[in-house]
Amino acid sequence: MTTTQLRRAVAALSAAAALAAAPAARAADTGGSAGPNTIYAGLAYLQVHSSLPDLSGMNTPAGLNLDVGNATTLGLGIVHDVAPAWSVELALGVPPRVRTDAMGANWAAAGVRPGVGIVDVHMISPTVFANYHPLGVDSRIDPYVGIGVNYTRFTDTTALNALTGSVGPTQIHLSSSWGPAAHVGLVYHLDRRWSVVGSVAIADVQSDMTATTYVPGTSIVSMQGKTHINFHPIVYSLALGYSF
């Protein structure tokens, strides 16, 4: 065998080896994850479909209701694969500011224009899910469904000037909530480490609300209204995930 023929043979063997290895390399690059953990961050849109009876209580006029608004925030979370078709997830997020508007014509009798924002509140709402992946957690296209438990705590609750300027200094209290949650989603693995995650989640979030109004400059209660809010939230999320 001449030197030229030897070079050609080596080149042919090298090319064949490269072709044989290429599918496996592509599979390693696009299928599965780099490890059992994935962190994600992205956009989360909170859509609230609230329902509640009218406020009632000491000196509270009849026909006062509320409309809880929507919010957009940064969604965060971590997923841990526990089996080929199962994972557990902790879904978090930057607490969104949710505005509540006065609803009902009788607000005008209290000096508040119906439809105006009267209360702001931040919602801390971590949720733990157990997820089932019918195609397996390592599938490039990975749909999943999950059930779990949600805890919601309301912080930085503020009565706005539209309310306090009409009825007086007011404190708002919202009780915390525990309830079931569920979601469906789809993971698309861009490669072994990076993925795009989309999901839709619902949860049972309810709270007892108390609005206490004081005579200006005193601790004397002039009016107190209570109600029970069922938030009926739906959260739409789109995020980028990193596996390790």
Image: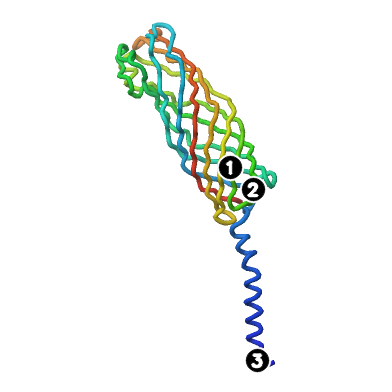
Rounded to the nearest angstrom, the CA distance separating label 1 from label 3 is: 58 Å
Residue at the image position 58 percent from the left and 54 percent from the top: 193
Q: Position of residue 56 (x, y in %)?
A: 43, 10
Q: Amino acid at mark 1?
A: Ile
Asked if the residue at tag 2 contacts the one at tag 1, i.e. Cβ–Cβ closer than 8 Å, the answer is: no
Q: Could you say whether the residue bearing mark 2 is in a helix, strand or loop? A: loop
Comparing 194 with 214, the one in front is 194
Q: Position of residue 210 (x, y in %)?
A: 46, 15
Q: Could you say whether the residue bearing mark 3 is in a helix, strand or loop? A: helix
Q: Which mark is residue 41?
A: none
Q: How is the image coloured?
A: rainbow
Mark closest to the chain's N terminus, 1 or 2:
1
Residue 222 vs 73, above or below: the answer is above
Q: Nearer the viewer, mark 1 or mark 2?
A: 2
Q: Amino acid at mark 3?
A: Thr
Q: Position of residue 48 (x, y in %)?
A: 45, 29
Please give the residue where the numbered disc 3 appears in the rendered image: 3
Quarter of the view holding residue 184: top right
Quarter of the view holding residue 213: top left
Please give the residue where the numbered disc 2 appears in the rendered image: 135
Q: Nearer the viewer, mark 3 or mark 2?
A: 2
Residue 242 vs 21, above or below: the answer is above
Q: Position of residue 31 (x, y in %)?
A: 61, 56
Please give the residue where the numbered disc 1 appears in the rendered image: 78
Local crowd size for mark 3, using a 10 Å CA cut-off: few (<14), some (14–19), many (≥20): few
Rounded to the nearest angstrom, the CA distance separating label 1 from label 2 is: 20 Å
Local crowd size for mark 2, using a 10 Å CA cut-off: few (<14), some (14–19), many (≥20): some
Q: Is residue 12 left or right of residue 199?
A: right
Mark closest to the chain's N terminus, 3 or 2:
3
